């Protein structure tokens, strides 16, 4: 699976050049190469192994995933002040299998870093110029090709997790897949965190202490301490919490409110660079997989009546396929939901999620985007109105303040 290190595509013009070799970049490269397009992928470390754990609701995953990509799935639970059974199957992906499935030998891989792009050309840090009809920025929250210079502190999701065997995990979870467990069993005051406990397949379970969103992100050492306290409170011994084994520890830190991408001519943003990260959940992989198929369809259109479509039109089609205007509106509405969360007093957060998970499944799915409604403005609006109707007067006041006042720092602990 190794890339052809040092290979340069010379002056041959590519249909698509992808900057960034993560899941979003390889999803697009793979989908387009399978449609017969000439694709170049540029990444500083194209042979690196992906290590993060990716999850998604089963019905938001695209059809045709390679066998083995879904490592495990089950119906999950959310626990705030009360337990809520979520009548949706939640899937955990096998990250190495996903990486293997998306790799495509038909993609020309270049080791390097794209530092600039304009219509018809991408420039690498070493000065190499690569001609390409369309350039995709899949560099994540870095947004390497964006013309924006917004360096404001972003709200971050942070987490620390350990991988244990099923029997050990069952002493903490009662054998359930816990999408969120807000019970403060760690005994620490301040900004609330929850336990995310999911099966990884092969008799392994990830137990992860998670801060959904905070500005600035809750520090990893604090999460490590809370995880240990939570697991000890459930009866685990120090020797059963493998924090000294790097292969069984996961550290997570990424922004959930990346600003809109300032795309120069000829550039389309993908994945977290777009941004396609859901502000309320941090999910993006399933969306990137679906978007990749739409991008390939847009770029592979070669019918006679479109044979004379110029580059600008093709880029416009690609942008519409990856994130149209309606999807941008829905994302903006969900960003307001993030603002509400960030402005809640710490003690109110579990109550908010108790109300949220009591929503009818259709509205809950619409807000989380798990029904594929990322570009359905009316459905998203109905879901947010339903959330408002379920809140008590105090929480409604916080919602209105978050909607009117916009982003804020985390309340004092």
Image (tube, rainbow, N blue to C red):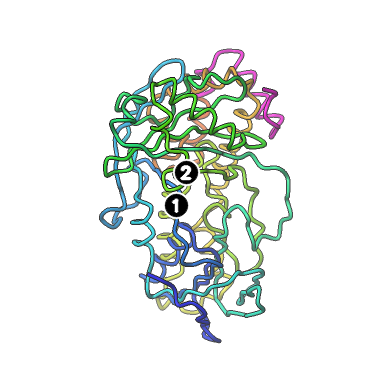
Query: Separation of disc 1 and disc 2 at Cα?
Result: 8 Å
Q: In front: 47, or 107?
A: 47
Pointer 1 with pointer 2, Cβ within 8 A = yes
The quadrant of the rendering that contains the N terminus is bottom left
Question: Among all residues in the image, which is located at the extreme front?
Answer: 239
Q: Position of residue 208 (x, y in %)?
A: 45, 35
Q: Position of residue 242 (x, y in %)?
A: 42, 38
Residue at mark 2 = 250
At label 2, counting other C-alpha atoms closer than 10 Å, the crowd grade (few under 14, some 14-19, many 20 or more) is: some
Query: If the image is split into quadrants, where does the C terminus sit?
Result: top right
Q: Position of residue 220 (x, y in %)?
A: 58, 37
Residue in view at x 46 percent, y 79 percent: 307
What segment carries the magenta color?
386-413
- Secondary element at tag 1: loop
Report which residue position mark 1 lands on: 51
- Tell me the chief SS of the magenta region: helix
Percent position (x, y) of residue 350? 52, 20
**Is 47 one of the magenta-colored residues?**
no
């Amino acid at each position: 699976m190794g890339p052809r290190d040092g290979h340069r595509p010379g002056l041959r013009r590519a249909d698509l050049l992808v900057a960034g070799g993560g899941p979003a970049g390889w999803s697009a490269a793979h989908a387009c190469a399978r449609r017969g397009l000439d694709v170049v992928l540029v990444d500083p470390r194209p042979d690196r192994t992906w290590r993060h754990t990716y999850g998604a609701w089963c019905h938001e995953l695209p059809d045709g995933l390679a066998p083995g990509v879904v490592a495990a799935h089950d119906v999950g639970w959310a626990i705030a002040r009360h337990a809520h059974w979520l009548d949706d199957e939640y899937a955990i992906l096998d990250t190495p299998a996903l990486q293997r499935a998306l790799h495509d030998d038909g993609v020309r891989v270049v080791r390097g870093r794209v530092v600039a792009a304009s219509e018809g050309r991408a420039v690498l840090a070493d000065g190499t110029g690569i001609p390409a009809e369309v350039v995709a920025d899949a560099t994540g929250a870095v947004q390497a090709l964006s013309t924006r210079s917004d360096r404001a502190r972003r709200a971050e999701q942070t987490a620390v997790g350990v991988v244990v065997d099923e029997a050990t995990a069952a002493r903490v979870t009662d054998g359930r897949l816990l999408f969120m467990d807000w019970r403060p069993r760690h005994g620490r005051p301040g900004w609330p965190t929850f336990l995310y406990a999911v099966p990884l397949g092969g008799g392994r379970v990830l137990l992860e202490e998670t801060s959904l969103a905070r500005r600035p992100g809750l520090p990893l050492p604090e999460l490590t301490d809370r995880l240990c306290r939570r697991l000890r409170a459930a009866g685990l011994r120090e020797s059963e919490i493998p924090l000294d084994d790097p292969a069984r520890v996961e550290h997570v830190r990424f922004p959930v409110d990346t600003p809109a991408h300032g795309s120069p001519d000829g550039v389309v943003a993908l994945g977290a660079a777009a941004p396609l990260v859901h502000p309320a959940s941090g999910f993006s992989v399933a969306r990137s997989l679906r978007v990749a198929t739409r991008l390939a369809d847009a770029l592979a259109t070669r019918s006679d009546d479109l044979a004379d479509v110029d580059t600008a039109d093709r880029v416009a089609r690609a942008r519409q396929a990856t994130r149209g205007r309606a999807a941008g509106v829905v994302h903006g509405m969900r960003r307001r939901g993030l603002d509400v969360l960030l402005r809640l007093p710490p003690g109110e957060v579990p109550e908010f999620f108790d109300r949220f998970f009591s929503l009818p499944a259709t509205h809950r799915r619409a807000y989380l985007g798990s029904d594929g409604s990322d570009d359905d403005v009316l459905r998203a609006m109905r879901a947010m109105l339903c959330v408002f109707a379920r809140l008590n007067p105090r929480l409604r006041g916080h919602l209105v303040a978050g909607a009117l006042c916009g982003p804020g720092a985390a309340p004092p602990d």
